[in-house]
Image (cartoon, rainbow, N blue to C red):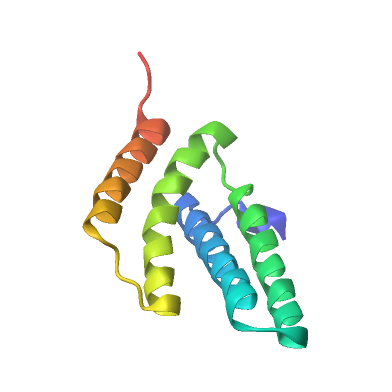
Amino acid sequence: MIKALNAVPLMVLLLIATTLEAAGDAVVRVAIYNHVGPIRYGLFLAGAALLLGYGSFLNLAPLDFGRVVGLYLATLFVVWQVISFIAFRSLPTLPILIGGALVIAGGAIITFWRPA
């Protein structure tokens, strides 16, 4: 199965990883603040599974870890805002958008800048 995943484009792996991480974090947040008892524990297990998936897909990316993290963080910011809107109906504020633009720029620099 891992060999088959080697043919998956980098951005697809990162989109899967970031979606799993943001969704896992959202599920854990819902478990902590909105539920008790068995439902809470089920949500914690679901969140843990999503976060394990995130770590697995991130580490399948065909770049060294230091370089993939830059692109990952930029992608994560965008996906996090989408998940935040879907799960919590929260729109990003101006400071979040400005900070996010810096995160995206920094991620691009880390990933794509090749020193001479």
Residue 103 appearing in the image: yes
Residues 57 and 89: in front is 89
Where does residue 77 sit, x and y in percent of width and height? Answer: 40, 54
Where does residue 71 sit, x and y in percent of width and height? Answer: 43, 44
Residues 11 and 39: in front is 39
Residue 64 appearing in the image: no
Query: In this rendering, would 113 be left or right of 48?
Result: left
Q: Residue at x 45, y 55 (%)?
A: 76
Query: In this rendering, would 108 be left or right of 65?
Result: left
23, above or below 10, in the image? below
Numbered marks: total: 0
* Residue 116 image-quadrant placement: top left
108, above or below 90, in the image? above
Q: Residue at x 35, y 32 (%)?
A: 109
Q: Quadrant of the N terminus?
A: bottom right
Residue furthest toward the top? 116
Residues 47 and 37: in front is 37
98, above or below 40, in the image? above
Where does residue 19 sit, x and y in percent of width and height? Answer: 51, 65
* Residue 35 image-quadrant placement: bottom right
Q: Residue at x 38, y 39 (%)?
A: 107
Q: Residue at x 71, y 68 (%)?
A: 49
54, above or below 83, in the image? above
